[in-house]
Image (cartoon, rainbow, N blue to C red):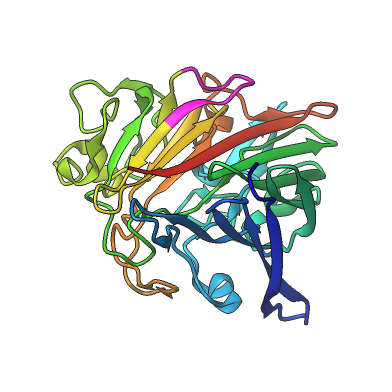
Amino acid sequence: MPDAGSIEKKPFGTMPNGMPIDEYLLSSGDTLRLGVIAYGGIVTRIEVPDRTGKMGNVTLGFDRLEDYRARSPYFGCITGRYANRIGGAHFTLDGIQYRLPANNGANTLHGGPYALDKQVWRAREIEIADGAGLELTHRSPDGAEGFPGNLTVTVVYTVRFGNEWRIDYRATTDKPTVVNLTNHAYFNLAGNGAGNILDHRLMLNADQFTPVDAASIPRGDIAGVGGTPFDFRTATRIGDRIGEPHPQLLNGKGYDHNWVVRGGGGKMPVPAARLEDPASGRIMEVQTNQPGIQFYAGNFLDGTPPGSGGTYRKHSGLCLETQHFPDSPNKPHFPSTVLRPRETFDSTTIHRFSAA
């Protein structure tokens, strides 16, 4: 029988109003350990073994709450109410136009400048038979960052025997609104601060992606990946094609695009991605029931936020954000992100770590 999971708690910092913030350390009962703080629901560390059994933190982050508050490029946080971008910082729902704050040029990124990643969530420890869990809850009031409806969001992080990290998202509203939630962890399977991710090998279970314009807003079409640098249907070294003069790579300054998950968008999670670091042997497999996954190769990391792993430069980490498609509220032919009263937004993402 596996050892029981456990949760430790230690001080991590203090908010300006004097509220203490703790770090919860969730252990799976074998070798996975996950650090979480209630501010932004941020995952501060993901510790897993390499092929020799050596433990390492495989996510980028900070050691101090002040750094997360002041300068984080969304390290490890819950993003929403609308993850990714909404073009023109507005959308229309049921004939009503809603204006949002523009925090990414003329567009809204990750729900606005004071979105869910900037909130202190209510945390509750959960006991489970084969691991440990933490439930985070937040009520986003009607009109927050321009979005309609009082939105109640619950995010549950669980770690389970077998080195599995699972995220379950749930949201309800009292007015029609739009919702798109994800986690923005940056991964480097070689270890936090251990160089760049260009030698990592990535497989994406996707035949199509959504091309973007120069502002990284989807144009509205869905394109095949065949014959392009966006074809990751078989495991491919990330650095092999990232520098090609493909118009989409130029628009995104590298990979920063949404792929259409094959079989995604249903009730049950399906394989979405597999990431491998040949040097350490670490492997991460991602499953989701969301229709899309954003692969972002850390193109805009510029060395200015010194983190827990040292200086993070371009490509020091990558994101695999399970999601609905960006700008879906303005693209009616994309899978809908509309949530209405008496409906429930449900989303699940599973990360499984191993080594070979």
Left or right of 292? Residue 37 is right
Q: Is residue 273 visible?
A: yes
Give coordinates of residue 161: x percent, y percent.
Answer: 60, 43
Residue 271 sits inside the magenta stretch: yes
Give coordinates of residue 243: x percent, y percent.
Answer: 16, 46
Left or right of 120? Residue 159 is left
- Quadrant (top left/top right/bottom left/bottom right) for the C terminus: top left
Which region shows up in magenta?
Answer: 263-272
Left or right of 91? Residue 200 is left
Q: Residue at image x 46%, y 55%?
A: 48
Q: Main secondary structure of the magenta part?
A: loop
Give coordinates of residue 84: x percent, y percent.
Answer: 51, 44
Given residues 103 and 338, the one toward you in this image is 338
Left or right of 223? Residue 28 is right
Up the image or down, 29 lies above or below 20; here it is above
Given residues 31 and 193, the one toward you in this image is 31
Given residues 135 and 68, the one toward you in this image is 135
Q: Residue at image x 85%, y 36%?
A: 174
- Quadrant (top left/top right/bottom left/bottom right) for the N terminus: top right
Residue 285 sits inside the magenta stretch: no
